[in-house]
Image (tube, coloured by chain):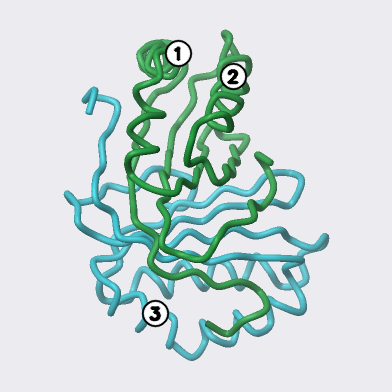
Chain colours: A cyan, B green
Amino acid sequence: MVGSMSTLPAPPYYVVCFSSRRKSGDDGYSAMANAMVELAQKQPGFLGIESVRGDDGFGITNSFWTDEASIKAWKAVVSHQAAQRLGRERWYEDYRVIVAKVERAYGIDRAD
Amino acid sequence: MVGSMSTLPAPPYYVVCFSSRRKSGDDGYSAMANAMVELAQKQPGFLGIESVRGDDGFGITNSFWTDEASIKAWKAVVSHQAAQRLGRERWYEDYRVIVAKVERAYGIDRAD
């Protein structure tokens, strides 16, 4: 699930790219991150999530959604919002979120 | 650069999300990966690249581009194409590329 490749439908769908640099120490981060993934999976419009973090604290999480409304609904969920607020102070030195509409996709089996 | 957060303009721009699972062993992979990053940086329309790979071989590389034409031009560059062909056989168990148009972006300093 996280840390492996999601199975996705044909475009169009949406991707949310979350790039971040962690502060050192866990400080409740792992529990929050797992809860956020479980929460995302339960949301309408959720298609998949992929996440990697390097030893240097820099990480990328790409989550996939059917439409923008689903992304906005996910963002509005209270516990997610709470994690975002706490994250600013406790867990992240820096982060960036982008929301993008997937127009094309191809895999290992096709030249394009 | 890779492994750190890119500085990006305001949307719209494009993101290419490359998810992959490596085979074990380097077998020329690191040299190719570095060459690909250097090549991307020289391309017109290149905005930035962020890349992380976990110890389990799963990795995400998000690269950022001004427009679709820049992405297509990058893909068409001969050495990049060669790396893609070789990658299928030598370096990757699996990979997926998506091309998406960034509509919104926000960072640690803004609620949205």
Discs 2, 3: same chain: no
Local SS, label 3: helix
In which quarter of the view is residue B21 placed? Answer: top left
Give the number of the disc on residue A74.
Answer: 3
Q: Secondary structure at mark 2?
A: helix
Q: Tell which subunit mark 2 falls on.
A: B
* Whole-percent x, y for residue B13 in the image: 42, 56
Q: Amino acid at mark 1?
A: Ser
| Rendered image quadrant of residue A82 | bottom right
Q: Which mark is residue A63?
A: none
Q: Could you give the CA–CA distance between mark 3 and mark 1, rounded to whole angstroms?
A: 41 Å
Label located before the other in sequence (2 or 1) = 2
Q: Chain of mark 1?
A: B
Q: Position of residue A37 (x, y in %)?
A: 47, 67
Front position among marks 3 and 1: 1
Residue shown at the point (41%, 66%) measured from the top left: A99
Q: Quadrant of residue B29?
A: top right
Q: Nearer the viewer, residue B37 or A11?
A: B37
- Residue furthest to the right: A24
Q: Secondary structure at mark 1?
A: helix
Task: Provide the residue designation for mark 2.
Answer: B35
Q: Name the residue furthest front.
A: B44
Q: Which image quadrant: the C terminus of chain A?
A: top left
- From the image, tell me which residue sits under label 1: B79
CB atoms of marks 2 and 1 within 8 Å: yes
Q: Amino acid at mark 3?
A: Trp
Q: Residues within 10 Å of mark 1 (few under 14, many from 20)?
A: some
